[in-house]
Every structure is written in structure tokens, then in C-alpha cells.
Image (tube, rainbow, N blue to C red):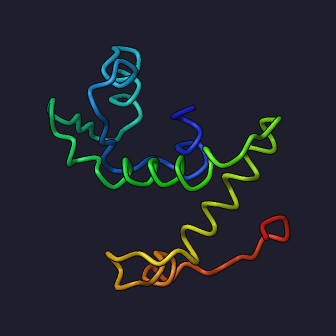
Amino acid sequence: MVLAPIHKFGLPEIMTTDQGRQFTAVAWTDRMKWVGPRLSIDCMGRCVDSIFIERLWRSLKHECVYLHAWETRSQAKAGIGCWIIFYNHQQPHAAHGGQPPAVVSSIPFKPNRRCR
């Protein structure tokens, strides 16, 4: 699952992870050493290092996942995809002066007919 984005977008220069079992296993660290990115494993108790992604997961769960009872994986994937489009292109963010991340980052908006 973690390797899918690497296959799609290529390797980052640095791979930052927490100290979870999946990221400290020899199989994972050996593979990363072999394919190239430098590993940066956060110190124990450094929750501020992942605060942005933790906040994103919290928002996703409370604003989307907990509000729906999808019956299939494809319904969940479509629903979460629509929420991510909303979050990036329409949701105002205080950290960006009330603008969505896509506006600040100049990411073009591609409307999705399934998302209403």
C-alpha cells in the first residue's frame, strides 16, 4: 500500500516516517536503502513532526467518513475522493489566510461530475 504512490509519482528524496513496525522492519529499511530515498524516522514522542497529516486524517474522519455508511469499497473510495477535492479546492484554511490549499499552491481545479 505504501509503495503505490512511489510507483505512481516516483521516489522522494527523503522518506519521513514514524517508528511504526512497518517502517522499522528490516524488509522496509533495506528496500528503501536499495531504491534510494534517505530515511528520516521521527524520534519517539515527536508528534509535531506529523501534525499536518494527523490533522488531515482527523478532518477526513470527522467531516466525511463518520458521516457516511458506504456499503462498498468503491463507494468509500469515490466519497473520500470527492471530500479530498473539496478539502483542497473549496475548504477555507486559516493557515492560508482563508484560502484553500489548491489556490495557494496554484493547483488547477479539475471538476469531477460524481462530486456534488
Seen from the viewer's position, the closer of residues 30 and 19 is: 19
In this view, 62 is above or below 28: below
Q: Quadrant of the N terminus?
A: top right
Residue drawn at point x = 54 percent, y = 70 percent: 88
In this view, 75 is above or below 79: above
In this view, 94 is above or below 97: above
The answer to whether 71 appears left or right of 37 in the picture is right
Q: Quadrant of the C terminus?
A: bottom right
The picture places residue 42, in percent across and down from the top left corner, at: 20, 36
**Figure label count:** 0
Find residue 74 and report its image quarter.
top right
Find residue 23 and report its image quarter.
top left
The answer to whether 72 appears left or right of 57 in the picture is right
Find residue 47 and report its image quarter.
top left
Residue drawn at point x = 55 percent, y = 78 percent: 107
Seen from the viewer's position, the closer of residues 27 and 53 is: 53
Residue at the far top: name it: 26
Residue drawn at point x = 58 percent, y = 76 percent: 89
The answer to whether 22 appears left or right of 82 in the picture is left
Seen from the viewer's position, the closer of residues 17 and 88 is: 88
The picture places residue 73, in percent across and down from the top left corner, at: 77, 36
In this view, 67 is above or below 27: below
Residue drawn at point x = 20 percent, y = 48 percent: 48
The answer to whether 107 appears left or right of 49 in the picture is right
